[in-house]
Image (cartoon, helix red, strand yellow):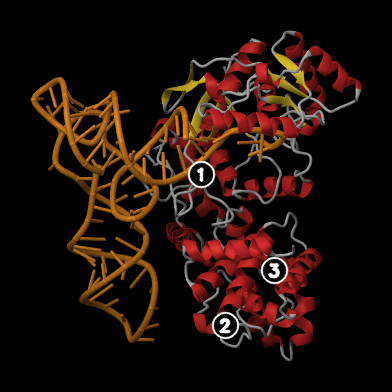
Amino acid sequence: MTVRTRIAPSPTGDPHVGTAYIALFNLCFARQHNGQFILRIEDTDQARSTTESEQSIYDSLRWMGLDWDEGPDKGGDFGPYRQSERRDIYAKYAQELVDKGHAFHCYRTPEELDELRAARREAGGFTALKPSELKLSDAEVAKRKEAGMPFVVRMNVPEGEGPCPVDDMLRGTIELDWGQVDAQILLKSDGMPTYHLANVVDDHLMEITHVLRGEEWINSAPKHKLLYEYFGWEMPQLCHLPLLRNPDKSKLSKRKNPTSILYYQKMGYLPEALVNYLGRMGWSMPDESEKFTLQQMMDNFDVQRVSLGGPIFDVEKLSWLNSLWIRDDLSLDQLADRLQEWMFNRDNLMAVLPQAQTRMNTLSDFAPLTAFLASGQLPLTAASFDEVKLDDDQLKQVLQFALWRLEALRTWERDEIFTTLKTLAGELDIKLKDFLAPLFIAIAGTTASFSVMDSMVLLGPDMSRARLRHALNVRVGELGKKQMKKLDKAYAALGQ
RNA sequence: GUCCCAUUGGUCUAUUGGUAGGACGUCAGGCUUUCAACCUGAAGAGAGGGGAUCAAUACCCCUAUGGGACACCA
């Protein structure tokens, strides 16, 4: 049997370090067993998936050296590798389940579902909705069908409670309860499969033998197990890896930390160091070396050496590792190449020059004018904001609200950013010029700079957010719960 | 609220029953025109309570704490 593992990212938003983390372990596991590593794109969420995001997943995984044997861009014998192109396959298997009585059409409306859930919650105990309570009378089904109401395909699950053992390569047998397993939607009303169906069908058809995935999936393992049973397929070995954490121990999230691989790239971390660091998260070399290459990790990989406590992503240690890579592994020639590739390349210059040209008297003006674009965190102090014509409360609001609005953006594009900020300025009733001043300082370090919107585009979303967050910390410190609540309230009241 | 997973210094980890070790960070000293690098040293950990064992950080139970999951998102 050939070992086959996969990474199955969903192309929504920026490529996540968590994706690279899971990819790394799957890659190493596959290589250790002379197996294959597959990339599959899980773009079943039509509303959120984008091709740009898909492309940036390829680019950033490749940048880190985490290459795959089969994938949408590479082909392979088990394609297509993009789930949106496998619709018919899922429809067929969903129908098979319906035919066998393992799944059913459900015409429940969102409102009805809310009510059922509320009732369940009220009663205490398990909240999972079971087939019996979702099923409508035959007459009602016929009526809704007649009326052309949308429906979904749900799986049948055991009605009662009872143990459902799930085997995990690291945790042994985990005992879950059928009571918490709901009649999961398999096919959405748009005809697309949910993760659960697509995942099981694809893993089977693509002959995946081992699934190394995040801990967050443990609770849905019973559904997957049931599906394999319904289909009469052998289930791959499961291995749930610990989740990367924010410094407050919560799951790594972009609201609290930069999570985009692009950010770490922009910060000037070397791909070797980033991979190296991720390899040290929850894993160690047999001799405990701190610094190792991807090849060395693959050569020494043993999944049993994974430790299960959720590791906190510590940028300081990452920076230290990166410094090792910079001074121990690069000749001056290579370092020069890296710098050029990283920031000082023609494309980047051409992107900034339109902004810089009219503001330059001499060529030497260029460096100070654009230094903030090639910087990490800016050396701000509370006094940096002194010239801003806003009181403390306003300043706090401008920075925090702008950050929140920008976090909510799905795309990162100049006009949209501008509209967002202008709208917010209006809602806060602050003149645009005064409103933008603190943003200038947070992003560029000074108000004497070119358009802050253009700067943000050049810096990218994660770096821009990180700078705003940094500015907030510098100026107002960590916000207490009380203050946060107050801000939250004021924010919620905006634009109403 | 319910279920699941986890728990070694501030952080990443080693030790899969036999004196708790390494790394980052911190602090002190050295080297250096300065800074960094480098060298030396220091402080700092088994969440708590029960068990079985000659012996537990490691095995079992309880408690606590942290996290995750409970969607027509993955």
Answer above or below: position of A77 versus A74: above
> Foreground residue, A446 or A428?
A428
Q: Amino acid at mark 1?
A: Leu
Q: Which mark is residue A294?
A: 1
Q: Are marks 3 and 2 on the same chain?
A: yes
Element at label 2:
helix
Pointer 3 or 2: first along the chain = 2
**Mark 3 to mark 1: distance in Å?**
33 Å
Which residue does the numbered mark 2 point to in the structure image? A385
Pinpoint residue A17: horizontal percent, then vertical percent: 57, 49
Mark 3 or mark 1, earlier in chain: 1
Chain to which the residue tagged by mark 1 belongs: A
Q: Nearer the viewer, residue A241 or A475?
A: A475
The percent coordinates of residue A272 (x first, y second) are 53, 52
Q: Is residue A67 visible?
A: yes
| Residue A123, placed above or below residue B7 | above
* The quadrant where residue A451 appears: bottom right
Which quadrant holds residue A450? bottom right
Q: Three-letter amino acid code at disc 2?
A: Phe
Residue that extends furthest to the bottom in the rendered view of this protein:
A361
N-terminal-most mark, 1 or 2: 1
Q: Chain of mark 2?
A: A
